[in-house]
Amino acid sequence: LNVDLASHIVRLGVGDGRLDPLHYAEVNHPILKDGVLQYALRIRVDQTERFDLFHIAIWEISLLLSVTAIFVVGVPAYLSAKSRKVADLADQRAHYLTAHDPLTGLDNRKRLIQKLENACSNTEKAEKLLLATIDVDGFREINDEAGHEVGDQLLTLFASTLKNTCGNSLSIARIGGDEYACVTPFTDRGKLQDFLEELQSALSISFQADGQKQLATASVGAAVYPTDAKDVPDLIKKAETALKVAKSAGGNKTAIFDQEMERGIAERRALESLIRHATKHHTFDVHFQPLICGAQMEVCSFEALVRLRDAAGQIVSPEKFIPIAEDMGIMEEFGAAILHKAARAAVHWPNHIRLAVNLSAVQFESGNIVKTVERVLKTTSLPANRLELEITESLLMQDTDGILSQLIGLKALGVSIAMDDFGTGYSSLGYLWKFPFDKIKIDRSFLRDEEVCCEETKQVISTIIALAHTLDMHVTAEGVESECHVAMLRQLNCDQMQGFYFGRPTPSYDLSKFWSPNNYIDRRLLAV
Ligand code: C2E
Ligand code: CA
Ligand code: CA
């Protein structure tokens, strides 16, 4: 129908008198009569309530969608941002750790080297660089005794002291467990010594351990670029060489590198490898020095004295290499090998001749000495009563209970114990009461020169002999070099004598001359 419906619409209103609903559905329906449009009926159905429900549903759905979107997109985005931040922090930390020491915040070795490389390539002609390496004295003991927490605190204290003392340094670094370094440019060599002394004294640090105040010190070794070294590795090596010298001088010392030190270190290294090799392959000799006993002046014992030859075939003094072997921590093994070699030789001597072997104090540290001696006696078949062990009083200055029980254990095996070098220590007499020694050996310094045959020395030796006899101990006088010594010692009733006058330390193959019928010992001595 081509009719404009809209013009026929009559507003009838709705039953309850309300106006059009806010939201409705609408339909226009034409009313025809005889095919002619009479009017149109527009029906509006109130959809407000539905619309509201629909609207709420839409709103809920969109809220749900938004929340889901937040979860699906936002949370991963948030998490990824967060993990990126964590990763960034970790990166920063890793980057920091590649250059710094985590405990003290100082530069680490790598950064120190980088800074040194830069500084060395930019050093002006007049300027020099000082590299000071610093090592805390006895840190391992402090750490073991006071605990790691105190150890860490102490390391931090050393770090802050270095920061305060080496204020304008190019780098202050921790380059090892208890080792630090500082690099300082300088122009005036005259001030170097003052700087190092100031550093050394600042590094005496008091700290608390077990409720007690203790003092920690450090050793300093220094080298100068370009005077002492041509490049950075060389400079570090030389500063560490100086440090080793400062440490081996007893610690709490400063040493500036000089060429002589390098020779000393090389010599020490050569000795260390000689000792290591000798211990492993038994490439050492034992020489034996006779001890003369009694009125008949007969050889009754030999003291075993170890000998090492260097690469040039020269004999190295045990006074030089024994302390190094002790330092190296190899003396227990070395000492056992010496004892074994000496005992193997002694079983071929006449039965009445005994063997004396020196024991170093460090051979008592592990608590195995009794077992070691027992094993040697067993494997060599040397009767225990033919073995005498010589110890020095320094042994008794340590943890005496542990030492005394081991000495008692040794005596229980049937060996005898002598106190060596008597008269050289601080309070020798005190130690004589601690343990029933079988013998004391008066140090050879008492007989150093001819003048000792003077009345005064005679009195001292006489007193020592009287004291030893009162305590039921025998006495050996060492360093007997002259007829005068022999006459004096015989007069004083000294039980045994040992010295170059009777015989020098002699290789095993040449010992029989001391007990052969044409006795090597000059019988005229009996008349002295
Ligand atoms: P020591 O135990 O006092 O040994 C005696 C040292 O005095 C020996 O030196 C000996 O050669 C030397 N001597 C002996 N008679 C005379 C003398 O009349 N005049 C002079 N001036 N010296 C004399 P050596 O063999 O050089 O040994 C030195 C030190 O090395 C020994 O002193 C001992 O403490 C140590 N030693 C030697 N061998 C061993 C060993 O196997 N184990 C241990 N732990 N220490 C040893
Ligand atoms: Ca000795
Ligand atoms: Ca001695």
Image (cartoon, helix red, strand yellow):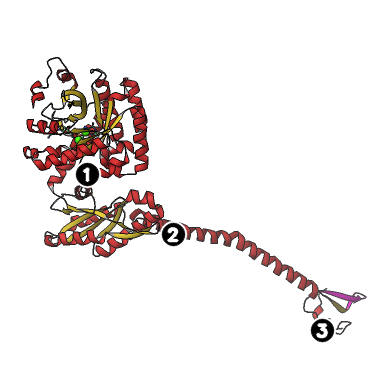
- Tell me the magenta residue range: 8-37
* Residue at 25% over, 38% down: 392
Residue 527 appears at what percent x and percent y? 8, 24
What amino acid is at disc 1?
A: Gly
Q: Secondary structure at mark 2?
A: helix
Quick check: can you spot residue 357?
yes
Question: Which image quadrant is residue 298 in?
Answer: top left
Q: Is residue 82 magenta?
A: no
Q: Secondary structure at mark 3?
A: loop
Q: Are marks 2 and 3 in contact (CB under 8 Å)?
A: no
Q: Is residue 521 above or below residue 424?
A: above
Between 361 and 525, the one nearer to me in the picture? 525
Residue 425's label in the rendered image is 1
Quadrant location of ligand 1? top left
Q: Which residue is mark 3?
A: 19
Q: Secondary structure at mark 1?
A: loop
Question: Which label lies toward us, 1 or 2?
Answer: 1
* Quarter that holds the C terminus: top left
Q: Which residue is mark 2?
A: 89
